[in-house]
Image (cartoon, rainbow, N blue to C red):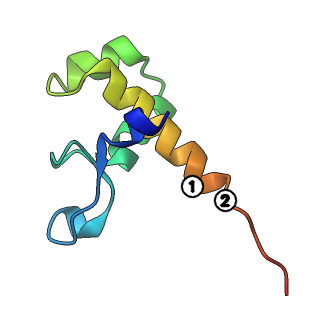
Amino acid sequence: MPELLKRITINPKQCGGRPCIRGMRIRVSDVLDLFVAGLNAEEILEEMPDLEKDDLKAALAYASRKLNHPVLVA
């Protein structure tokens, strides 16, 4: 999974510093929104031809890691 996460880039000067795919102006949230809208991986790749299958996996892996962070209770 660490190799996949290298596909996620964060640049404060691009897309408001939100995580993007390989330095493009395609945000991780854009990919996730397409999955939520009911598109499957093949349809997303057709919709966004600059993406690769591993980019979709990277977006899901990134979201999973962000949701699974430890929460410290004081």
Extreme-right residue of the structure = 74
Secondary structure state at the residue bearing disc 1: helix
**Residue at the spot of label 1:** 66
Is mark 1 in CB contact (under 8 Å) with mark 2?
yes
Secondary structure state at the residue bearing disc 2: loop
Q: Is residue 34 visible?
A: no
To which quarter of the image does residue 48 belong? top left
| Residue 17 drawn above or below residue 67 | below
Task: Please state if 27 lies on the left or on the right of 23 as rendered.
Answer: right
Residue 70, image x and y in percent?
73, 63
Task: Please state if 9 lies on the left or on the right of 49 as rendered.
Answer: right
Q: Residue at x 66, y 59 (%)?
A: 69
Q: Amino acid at mark 2?
A: His
- Is disc 1 surrounded by few (<14), some (14 to 19) or many (20+) residues within 10 Å? few
Q: Is residue 51 visible?
A: yes
Q: Amino acid at mark 1?
A: Lys
Residue 2, image x and y in percent?
46, 39
Extreme-front residue of the structure = 2
Where does the C terminus fall, quadrant-wise?
Answer: bottom right
**Residue at the spot of label 2:** 69
